[in-house]
Amino acid sequence: MAKTNAASREEAAAFWRKRPGAGFRVACVVFLVLAMMAPGLARAIEAIPVEPDQPRIDITTKGELYEGRGDRLQIETAPGPDGYIGRMAVQASTPGTNPGWLVFALSNPTEERIVRWLVAPRYTLANSGVLRPELDAPRIAAVTPSLGFRPEPLKSDRADMFRLNLEPGQTVTYAAELSSAHVPRLSLWDPNIYQAKQQDRMLFNGVLLGITGLLAIFLTAIFAANHRAIFPATALVAWAALVYFCVDFGFWNKLFPVGPDRTAVYRAAAEAGLAASLVLFLYTFLRIGLWHVWIKTAFWVWIAAQFALVAVAIIDPQTAAGLARASTLVIAGVGTGLIAYFALRGQDRAMSLIPSWMLLIVWLLGASMIVIGKLSGEVVVSGLVAGLVLIVVLLGFTVTQFAFRTGGGAVSLGPPSLVQMKSLAVDGSGTHVFQWHAGRDMITVASEVETELGLDPGSLSVPVDEFLQHMHASDRERFRLMLWSLQEKQGGDLQIDFRLRRHDGTYLWYDLKAHAAPNENVRLLRCVGLMRDVTSLKRSHERLMHDAVHDSLTGLPNRELFMDRLQGAITRAAEGQSHRPTLMFIDIDRFKNVNKSFGLVIGDSMLLTLGRRLGRHLNPQDTLARLGGDQFAILLISESDPHHVATLAERVRRALRTPMKISAKEIILTASIGIVVHDGSQTTAQDMLREGEIAMLRAKRGGADRIEIFNPAMRGEDESRLPLESELRMALDRQQISVLYQPITRLASNQLAGFEALLRWDHPTRGRLAPEDFIPLAEESGLIVELGSYVLGQALEQAASWHKVLPRDRDPLFVSVNVSSRQLFRQDMVQEIRLMLAREAVPRGTLKLEITESLVMENPERAVEILTWLKTFGAGLALDDFGTGYSSLSYLHRFPFDVIKVDRSLVRESTLNGQTPLILRSVVALAHELGKEVVAEGVETAADASYLRSIGCEFGQGFYYGEPMSAKDVATLLAALASHRKRKQRERARAPAEPQAPSGLEVNAPSQPALPALTGPSTA
């Protein structure tokens, strides 16, 4: 059609040259016709010269755009070299589409043929729009030239391309039929340069795809090893970016058999998926799920809506892409607010995300400027794509670093190996690596040891000789011998404790356990092990060892250490290796009165003073010990001359008499001192100590503040007076130790509440002995443990029988048993009582253990622990003799006692001293405030009982309610009470309407004892 129009123009020009006169008339007619055809006719345009060295020409800005001209367009061609302007008419490829036309003209001013490619990209991000963006679509339907053949279309998925041929000196006008309403960016490219440009772009795009793909694979793979939700969430962002890049770079059509006409759908879906992955990442990384339920629900609705845009892209790609682009602004705003809020609250996750999110905000700002057309150009678009890759990489780095940093250790892609677990165990155990290389005679120690010692780094990684200089002098030779032994045995184990010097001159103890693998070549021998700081353990062990053989109050040697040293002195004297030992047994006169008058604290301070005074008169080789209570002993090794010993004893006596000022009063203490000199007849320390005690007792009988020297005549006299250990042991075997029971009555109802177990020794020659006559001997000989177990067993056995005779659902009968110091602090006592209670199966609280105040004050912390165990196992606890000693109110609330037993002295003197009733009333009130019941001892008259009842005392014990009785008498009494109770029950059953009489266990006799006094011992 173009050739036909050109021939017609040449014939018309020749015709008008032959008839010049008619030209004017015809010109007027033609002008009118052209005016009428103005909507479909385009005027001539200026040709664009094409030079061979021009790589690219922007046609869009130099061509002319025609829109709304219908399916047919007539245009004037650009003037040729001869200045002739022709006309051409073009027809739309598809009738009825009313397309737009872009008309341009090209001229070849050279003498060579020029080949160019006309390129119209199907999609470009610049100026694509926000709400309904222009996505992938055909841009040019056809290109019609004014001369020659139609341009050849080139196959491309990313652009509409046509091959244009320009002959030398030729000017050709082209009309490009547009396929879309959006005017494309039309460019004329040198084919070689265009292909090189595309190759460079593909290389750049391939690098970006590779980085993103590797990051997506890494985050996905690491999730298999570290199952944290942040890894799949971040991996989803990377995968979404990878899909977007594949679509944008044109790789999607190469990976999948998808036509270019569907690229818009995938592009919109990729943009929607990328926005949705960002929302899911924010939800997971910031742990929004731990917030309120409504916030969690709102986020999930948002995430679902974002992912729903992927499905919308199939139906309407432009709408889906527009909503996705708009949502990125919302994501940026919400994410910035959340991150700022969490960061201000100190959340580590939010603070670690700040750099990545700031880069994302900058990227979104640049993307917004590009899509609305404020920025354009290939460099800008390429920079935007590279920025997205950088954001994804930074997100992956942040997630990985944060996840493994909060994990508390090095990066681990799987379960720890055995070597890793051993390394963690070494780090957690506080041990340090030690290494000795025998060939180089070199020791290497971990730097942590040097830090502990305050040394410079590398100070202990030195040869053995230099290492020994840091070691305590007493340990050096032993350590060297151990290393030498390893060399001789060509391997083996090394275990040793040694001390290393700190920078301040003090020493730390270390325990070293190492092993050297067997090796015949000694120079290759290497010993590797672990060393641990055991200074605190060593000091604790030393304290335990010291406390085991020293008195806890004075710090002096106790009985065990003193007896060991005395036995050693006797043995050396028998072998003629040293002087004969001399023993001084010292007993402070009337010291119990001091405790009663001033309390235990003052008494303890006085004992400390006495210990210091005695120590001043001894030489280093002598021994001063506290045997217990108010008794001291001195072992003299340095002096054997009797005159010097006597002089020393006199100095000791005078030192003890020195007044001590207490509470503005001067207190003078005296002591009874017994002296015994080893004469060869004493073979054991026990014999010599007993003789010293006999001499002390002789001095005490002679009056206070005396010194007596033992002589053999005293031995027979005192043996006949004091019970011997063998007799007490035989008494236990022959059951000469009897247990009596004294009633304890509930004062409010005059009802029998229980009994106290009291010991008596029925000696075959001396008659019945009270506890104070044999209990000290039992404690000294160690028989107190066996004696205490005997009493506990007898008392619990009797209590079990009482419950069978007189059962009570409420307030069952109890039995109280006194406990000594050795028995209480014995390790297996708690377990023994637990087994006894379980064997007899008595109700809880049946057994009440009476413990004196002075006993628990010996070691309050240990006493609290033991008493708590006893109470847990079902034993009741009573504080005995309250009011006779210190009466420590500050400690009273710490002990888990159920009952406080008031000493008989407070009750007996209540009518003699006007202040005693007030004290007794205060003690009862204090006990009630602490939630404890009170038992008053020494109730001997009805007045005592009435007064105690009036002040709220719960229990009473004394001769008024009954003397100590045997187990048989107790059984008779309980049988009578049980018979009386049954009779009363039968009477109530026969006359239910009559007023009920008191229970059979109650005796309403205010003028007489509630329980009849049975025949028994006259002493308690």
Image (cartoon, helix red, strand yellow):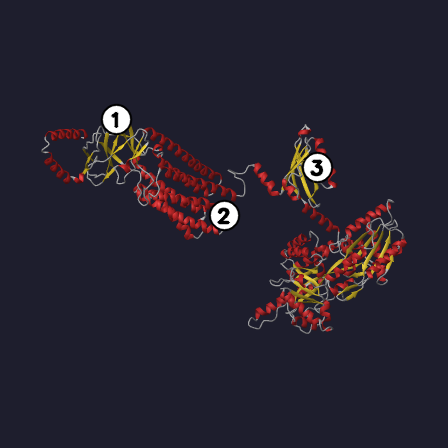
Residue visible at 17% across and 40% down? 38
Residue linked to disc 1:
168
SS at mark 3 in the image? helix
Q: In which quarter of the image is the C terminus?
A: bottom right
What residue is rendered at 73% in x and 68% in y?
905
Measure how far apart labels 3 and 1 are at the Cα level: 96 Å
Query: Which quadrant of the structure image shows residue 752?
Result: bottom right
Q: Which residue is drawn at 58% across and 69% down?
A: 988
Q: Dot 3, how many residues are within 10 Å of its Cα: few (below 14), some (14-19), or many (20+)?
A: some
Mark 1 residue element: loop
Q: Give the left or right position of residue 293, taking residue 665 as reference.
A: left
> Picture coordinates of residue 853 (x, y %)?
70, 61
The image's mark for residue 466 is: 3
Disc 2 on helix, strand or loop?
A: helix
Q: In this view, does 938 lie to the left or right of 390?
A: right
Residues 736 and 542: in front is 542
* Amino acid type, callout 1: Pro
Say which amino acid is labelled 2. Asp
**Residue placed furthest toward the front:** 21
Count every numbered label the image shows and give the total.
3
Can residue 718 be seen here?
Answer: no
Residue type at tag 3? Glu
Which of the 4 image quadrants contains residue 865? bottom right
Q: Is residue 622 among the parts visible in the rendering?
A: yes
- Whichever of labels 3 and 1 marks the residue nearer the N terminus, that label is 1
| Rendered location of residue 93, percent (x, y) | 21, 34
The answer to which of marks 2 and 1 sits earlier in the sequence is 1
Q: Which of marks 2 and 3 is nearer the N terminus?
A: 2
The residue that mark 2 highlights is 348
Question: Looking at the rendering, in which quadrant would you find the N terminus?
Answer: top left
